Image: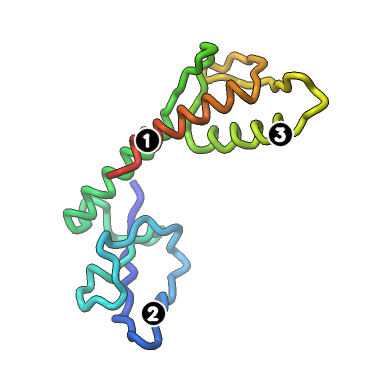
Amino acid sequence: MPMYSALIYSVADPVAGYFRPPRPETFVKLFMSSPTWNPFSLKEEDRTEYWEDTAGTIPVTQFPLSLAVRAEAKAARQTAVESILVTTSHGNTFNGDEESQTRMARAIIALNFQPQVPVPSIVWVLSNNATVVTTADDLTEALSLAGAAQAALWII
């Protein structure tokens, strides 16, 4: 289970703005900021970022309740996004996670720039690991379905 540390900003000067405090080398990646993030706030919780930290001492269960609930919801959302499967009208079932969506978009762009081929196609590995020859139209439909599925999951 990852551990976290809090990075607390000083109250920002309205004229000079704000600056991120020095970040320890053990901080791996930003996990989340306060939902009420405001560097000018006098409340410390409004000026706090939580970082995954190899030397961290805060388990997610010890975040302030609203942050803990939000962190759990974000983790559940990420798992759901990674599990998206979509089936096109051609009966092909594609992985719809974010990486797969990016790959689909790149393939669609490349296929649309092959004017010398009547119906450009590409060999694609489906969610069940079967390979099919598919077209930009099928990939566009899969990408659209996957994006809609992700959008439905996104709001926490």
Upstream in the sequence, badge 1 or badge 2? 2
Residue furthest toward the bottom? 15
Q: Please say if the residues under marks 1 and 2 sit with CB atoms less than 8 Å apart.
A: no
* Residue picked out by circle 1: 79
Res 110 label: 3
Disc 3 marks which amino acid?
A: Ala
Where's residue 32, x and y in %?
34, 57
Residue furthest toward the right? 116
Residue at mark 3 to residue at mark 2: CA–CA distance: 43 Å
* Residue picked out by circle 2: 18
Upstream in the sequence, badge 3 or badge 2? 2
Res 127 label: none
Front position in the image: 61 or 117: 117
Upstream in the sequence, badge 3 or badge 1? 1
Neighbour class for label 2 at 10 Å: few (<14), some, many (≥20)?
A: some
Left or right, 109 with respect to 36, comes to: right
Front position in the image: 71 or 153: 153
Disc 2 marks which amino acid?
A: Tyr
Where's residue 82, x and y in %?
43, 33
**Residue at x 34%, y 69% (from the top left corner):** 7
**Residue at x 28%, y 49% (from the top left corner):** 71
Q: Is residue 5 above or below residue 116?
A: below
Neighbour class for label 1 at 10 Å: few (<14), some, many (≥20)?
A: few
Left or right, 152 with respect to 88, comes to: left
Which mark is nearer the camera, 3 or 2?
Answer: 3
Looking at the rendering, in which quadrant would you find the C terminus? Answer: top left
Residue furthest toward the left? 65
Task: Choose top left, top right, bottom left or bottom right for residue 20.
Answer: bottom left
**Residue at x 27%, y 53% (from the top left corner):** 59
